[in-house]
Structures are given as C-alpha cells and as structure tokens.
Image (cartoon, helix red, strand yellow):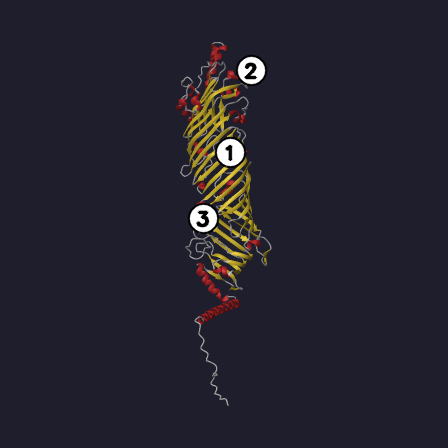
Amino acid sequence: MATTLTPHTGTPASRPPVPPRARSRWDAPLGIGLSIIACLIGLIILAWAILFVTKGRFLKHRFESIASSLSQRQVRVAGDFQLYFDPVNVKFVADGMTVSNPDWASKPNFFAADHIDARISTIRAIFGHYHARWLHLDNGAVDMEWDKSRTHNSWTFGDPNKKGKPFQMPVIEHAAVTGTTLRYRDPKMQIATDQSFGNVDSTGTHIDDAISFKGDGDYQGHAFTNQGKLLSPNTTVTLGRTQIELHADTGKTHLDLNGNMPTLTTIDGATADLAVRGPDARLLFDLMHVAIPDTRAYHFKSHLEKVDGDYRFTKLSGAFGDSDLAGSMTISLPNDRLKLDADIASHKLDIIDIGPFIGYDPNTLATKGATAAATTQSKTDHPRILPDAPLRVDSMKMFDAHVTYKVDTIRAPHVPVSNVALTLDLDHNMLKLSPLTMDIAGTGHLAADIGLNARVPAVYTTYDIRLSPTPLGRLMSGFGLKDSGTTGTIKARINMSGTGDSVRKSLATSNGRIAIVLPAGTFWTSYAQLSEFDVGVFLQKLLQKQLKSPIRINCGLIAFTVKNGVAAADPILIDTDKNLMAAKGGFSFVDESMNIQFRADGKKFSAFSGQSPVGIGGYFSAPALHIVSPQLVERVGAAVALGVVATPVASILAFVDPGDAKTAACGPVLAAAPASAQHSDKGKPISLLGTKGTNDQQAAKPKKKFLGIF
C-alpha cells in the first residue's frame, strides 16, 4: 500500500503547538535597576577616569566657589590645583593656597601655603571626619586668633556670628612638612605666641629625626621663649602616643617638661615629668592666676597628668629657700572658675621662709632681719616691724583654693615649734586659715582661726589665737632662761579684728583683747627679781650665791584691751610669794610705740628696794628698758637730803620697802578678767593697777621724758 504524504506546513502534524511563555512581573524593573546601576558605575568609572586623567584641574574655580561659600571665607588657589581619586582616597594638590581670616582678625589670612599635597580618606570625609592618610606641606602658615570678647575665633568656619568652637586638628597619619609656622592670639587671655617647626623628613612611613620647634611670645604681660622636640614622630603621625620635650623661659623662671600625649591633638590622658626653678615661686603661680606670697629661690619637680579637664601634679618635691616641700596639687576649672587643691608638707621649714606669708620680703628678711624687711607706708623717724605688703585682692578674685599644709619642724632660733597643721580655704574672696595648729616647746599647743573677708571694700580680718599651758622654761630657753628650776607655765589667747589690706593696717585698726595667763609655778630668782628691781633681795641672793634658788609665782596675768589699734594694760598683774607686781600703760599698733611701767610692792621688808617703776619704752623695732626713772631720782634726792640733814645711815631709809603689799586673788587673774574685776585675797582694790582710763591715756600718748630718761 502506498503511503500518502501531506505538504509541510511548518509544524509536523504529530508535534503539538508550544504555548506562549508567561512573562515575570519582575523582569522589567530588575533589568532597569541593573541597567541604572551599571550606568552609574560606568559614569563613576568614567568620572574617575576623567578626573584621573585630567587630575581634576578643571574643578579649580568650582572648588574655590564652593569652599568660599561653605566657609564664608575667601578661598583661593594661585597655582596648580588637583582634585581626584587616587585610587579611592581623595588626592588634593594646591599651590599658593590661601584661606582668609574674618574681618576682625589682625592678619588677612587664616591659612597660607606654597604647596599642599594630601590624600584624604573618602569614606571618613563622607561622614564629616577629615582624616589625612598623607600630607606634604611646604611653607605653611596658620594664624589662629580669638576676638576681643573671646566669642569668635578664626578657625570656626561658616556663619560668622556662630560662637567659636574649640580647635580640632585633622588626623594626619603620615606627613612631610617644611617651613611651617603657627601664630596664636588671644586678647582676652592676653596670650600671643609665634612658633616655627623644623622639617619633617619621611622615608616611606618612617620619619628619620625628631621634629623640633621653637618660638616666643607673651603671656599676661610676661615675655617668654621656648624650644622643644617631638621625640616620637613616627608614632605621632600614625596616631600613636606622642612624646614631647619642652624648655621654656619667662624672665628668670625656667620650665622643663618631658611628656607623652595619646596623640598630637589629644591632651586628655597626657602625662609628663615637669621641673621648674626660679628666684620667686610667686612669679610662676602668677602665670596660672594663682596668688601666693613671695618666696626665696625655689626648685620643684613633679609628675603631671591631664585627666577629665584637671591638671594633676603628683610626686611633687623640691625646696624654697632653706625649706623643703613635697605633696600633690590639682588645678581644675569647675564652673569655669579656676580651683587649686593641694596637699603639701615640709619636713623642715625655716622661720625666714615664713616671713613672706605675713608680708616680709624674703631675701631682705634673710640678709638684714625683720626690721629691714618691713617696709614703711608713711614717713616716720623710726623703722617699723609690722609688714605692710598689701593683700593681692584682685588676684584672689580669680580663683578658689583648698590647701592642707603640714610641717614637722620649724627652724626658729628662739622658740621650738613642731607639728604644724594648716588648712586654707579660699571661696570667692573669703579666705580662712582654720584650723592652724602647732606644738610649742614640746607640750604646749597653739591653735588659731584666722578669717579674711575681701568681699567687702575694706578687707576685714579676724584673729582668734589660743595657746594651751606651755612650759615657760622650755619656751624661753632660746632667750637664755634655762629649764632647770623653772616649773611655771604660760597660756594665752588673742581675739581681735580689724580692717585693712595688710597686716599693719588690720592691726592698726583692730579691736579686741590680748591675754597671757601665768598659772602657779616657780622661776629663777635672778630673772624674777631683776624684773621686779628688788635690789636688796637680788644683792642678798647674789652674795649668798643663791641665784638659782627659785621663787614662787602664785598667779599672773598680762592682758591688754585693744581699741582702734591701741592696747592698754587691762591688767598686768603678777603675784609672787614675795612681791605683787603690776603695770600701767600699753602699746600702739598704729605707730608701734610702747609705754609700759612695771612696779612691784614687796610683801616682806627689804632694805634696798628701789620701789620705782621699770619702764619699757621705745618702739617694736627699738625697745628701751628704763630702770632709772624719775621716781628713783626722787628717792636718790631724798637719800641725799637725809644724809646731809641727819647721818649717812639715815639715807638708807629712802630705799626701805615696808613690805605692805597685799596678795592678789588668783581667781580673777587666772580667768583673765579685766582690771576692774581684780582684787586682793581680802577683797580690797589693788591700787597698783590704776584705772582703765589712765591706762588708755598712757598707751595712746607716751609721757615726756624727764632729764632724758623715761
């Protein structure tokens, strides 16, 4: 059978037709997206290629325009300009680039450089962090200034009315720098300095030598010069720790520092070994706006650390004058006000080095003594002792302080002093020395609270000084009184207040009371009888070789009431087993004059008692002891008359003391009561005391001398 063939129509009759493929709804967008990305990548590659080939030189004017608009400064590039990706970091080259200063600045340009070649991290720049992988800078000059109100500065760009921000130096990993200078001006803080930096020579990523710098300037009216080195340039430019060596001089003050910083632009966490020396530590602290008294030549060293805004000085040690010093100190700025905290101590403190704390010039005090060291504010015919160095009130307004100071021993020629402890607090011109304590003569103890209010126009000072019972023999041993045979003690209190910006002024206007109490005890006859001027007893003891035989002090009080700087005896009364001694008069803080007359009445018969006052006159700086007095002259005249009229034996009667003195009641004496409350043990008034009115008059207006004697 024959097979029938059908004509070919395109699809075999035995193959079924294929249905059309379903189209995905994602095909078109995905393709478009991929196409866009491909185009962007292509454009970026093209832009990169164009920039790489042209070095971006055609962007020069566009860069100047955009940079000037963003910074609100004139940015200009005088020479070659390049801006492109190399390969991913931004490559920036500019020759003769300048960035102008604000109109108020003293220099036209904030920045100028002959040549800049830098590679900047692109990714970090996108997020606003300028991180230079590499910087080559030739003859760069930076001018950093604050305006007069310290509100705006030259390195805060953009809105010119925007408040100035702290300087944040860009991070630089590797650098090659030549001929770079820095100028800084701060009119409000009175700081001006010009610094120049030595060349930085990198071999690849390695800097071969230390980076040197030097400069000069002025701080608070003090000219200074400095020089130093970055001793770790390789770690410095790779964001590692920076080791710096610095020497600075201002006048005769010299500073040496060897320190480490976390990075060149990071101060917090910095540490350093610091050494300073000079003729007067006051000049050093003046630089920090901290007022301290003058000192003799000093040298100190310490470890310095910057932590959370505080400058911490630890392991402090050194000396000023003939005194040592050790401890720690912190300078901080709480509430933008300088605060000094210090915990310091001296093993031995020389008495001469204490002088400046009350106003004496330390060097004059050391070489010529207190009289020469005391200055004189008014013309007088005699030298003065009380210092008149004015309190530095203006400097005190600028800082607060809390200082603790301890001294093991004070080198003093006459009075043994040890275990001194002082707490000083200064709070907005209110100064307190409280407590101030020290041991006197081994077992005695002195405590004081001194307040100084400089918040008021007339500085107001209060003194409250207390001396516990102290062995008089040991206390006076430096003045020739031997401890053996003396069992007496002494206690005292001074409570006064006055106005004035110096020790002299505050005392010359003071009001209050001074009281020195002598409880019962024994004293050497030679000293007691000499002061009482009982010639008969003294000669008798001398002939019998009994000068070391003690006499008994029942009680004693040396007290003064102070009014307007004049101290009047109120009272001076000493009761011994043989005599009752009293004094009239007083002294003046105003002109430092003294006019005190001591007189003794015997309790027992004495054939050779002078029975006349012993006077203390003159001035603090030149006291005078007057044993021969008008009263004694009268007795001598009487003795002569009796010798002429009667017999020579009768003339002795003029020196006879009948011994009728009454024993004083010791209760009011030991209580430091005023003269009006003193009486004998029988309740009778003590005539030797006189009256408070006569004492005031004698203290304020000394009597005229008679025949050139007191």
Q: Amino acid at mark 2?
A: Gln
Q: Gap in Å between the C-alphas at discs 3 and 2?
A: 80 Å
Q: Gap in Å between the C-alphas at discs 1 and 3?
A: 41 Å
Circle 2 crowding by C-alpha within 10 Å: few under 14, some 14–19, many from 20: few
Say which of 175 and 13 sits in front: 13
For marks 1 and 3, the one nearer the N-term is 3
Q: How many marks?
A: 3
User: Residue pushed farthest bottom?
Assistant: 2
Name the residue that disc number 1 marks. Answer: 420
Name the residue that disc number 3 marks. Answer: 188
User: Residue pushed farthest front?
Assistant: 1
For marks 3 and 2, the one nearer the N-term is 3
Circle 1 crowding by C-alpha within 10 Å: few under 14, some 14–19, many from 20: many
Q: Gap in Å between the C-alphas at discs 2 and 1?
A: 45 Å
Q: Is residue 359 visible?
A: no
Name the residue that disc number 2 marks. Answer: 544
Say which of 116 and 492 sits in front: 492
Residue 310 image offset from top left, x and y in percent: 49, 46
Q: Amino acid at mark 3?
A: Lys
Residue 335 image offset from top left, x and y in percent: 43, 46
Residue 43 image offset from top left, x and y in percent: 49, 69
